[in-house]
Amino acid sequence: MSLASRFPVQARPAVHQLSGSLIREVANSAMGRADVLPFWFGESDQPTADYIRAAATRSLAAGETFYSQNLGRPYLREAIAAYLSRLHGQPLDPARVGVTASGDEGLMVAMQLLLSPGDRVVAITPLWPNICEMPRVLGAEVTRVPLSVAQGRWTLDLDRLLAALTPQTRLLIINSPNNPTGWTIDEAAIPLILAHCRRHGIWVLSDDVYERLVYDPAQASAPSFLRHAAPDDRFISVNSFSKAWRMTGWRAGWMVVPEALADDLAKLIEFNFSCVFEPIQRAGVAALEQGEADVARLRAELRASRQLLAGALQALPGVEVPEAGGAMYVFFRLAGCDDSLDLAKRLVGEVGLGLAPGAAFGPEGDGWLRWCHAVSDLQTLRTGVDRLTRFVARHRPG
């Protein structure tokens, strides 16, 4: 028996058994091809605003290239706290804020703070795949509570969720507005969920990365647990500069935690990424303090692009497009197409249309496709719809 067969070279089982990204599986097969229209990733097609880039450039020119505090520079923590206080009408102490190397990293650190092997996690699904795989990295188990379509709209069965939140549950994960569906939680549901979780000692982790990207122009942001949670509640909010400020490549975000967790959060940041590069922190301040007009512009663009895309898709035979409250996606399905990974690959191969397979977001998503509509040129969307139309016509029965 060889040494390799006795001692296989592989990661520990919890990591080795993780699922790879099906979005990447589709995108990697065609990324860079000029004949493919890519709508698979969740990001705007426009670069970060010049004043944000200029803030980072000035910081680099000033030589701000050294280590900073684990939780972030005080000026950025104060800017985040001031921004959230304005947005949600509730005072927030900067001592509760930690700066992270992306929202993704913030979610992972939050779970490292809270989860042990065997812990029970409840997640509202379908959901961005990374969030459901992170607990598995730590040996926790995930129970899925699926959204459903009711009266043509993505809907949460609140009674079903509360029934799943048993006293044995350690953590509830909520992403609203949701990736991939765009479902947005009702304000009235938040105090009910909080009261239930308080009663059983359940932590709530809210992924708020899309909170500014709501389609209703009368709303400054989506309904938020930050408006209802007390400072010492078992509640963590994770957010990112990526979406609302078009900063996906910068990898910068933040967490809001109970102040009692701040010291332990600083330890985990030290062990994971130490600190965020200071020019990026300067850029974050510029985004928060100067970016409202650009956030409003992006929101208007997303309203227009969703209206165009959803309307065009609904005009196709056999296409279902539920209504949603926010984010930057249309989650839809074609009648009779149950294998979304195969369908996404065929769309790339046959008509050059790059979409994310719904199966990437869990079994509830299979049969669906996610289309990111954060594009500045609406003609690009029209061309994409034309390609889907050709595909549907080619495969129409009879």
Image (cartoon, rainbow, N blue to C red):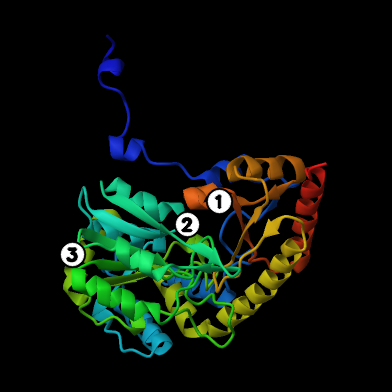
| Nearer the observer, 212 or 132 | 132
Residue 272 pos. (x, y %): 28, 55
Distance from label 3 to label 2 (Cα)? 31 Å
Quarter location, residue 150: bottom right
Q: Number of labelled discs?
A: 3
Q: Is residue 139 above or below residue 98?
A: above
Residue 218's place in the image compared with 38, above or below, is below
Q: Residue 5, relative to residue 344: is it above or below?
A: above
Q: Amino acid at mark 3?
A: Asp
The N terminus, quarter of image? top left
The image position of residue 326, as x and y in percent, is: 55, 72
Q: Which mark is residue 111?
A: none
Residue type indicated by callout 2: Pro
Quarter in which the C terminus is drawn: top right
Q: Which residue is mark 2?
A: 126
Residue that mark 3 sits on: 264
Q: Tag 1 or tag 3, which sits nearer the N-term? A: 3
Residue type indicated by callout 1: Gly
User: Does residue 268 show up?
Assistant: yes
Please state which of residues 214 and 49 is positioned toward the viewer in this rendering: 214
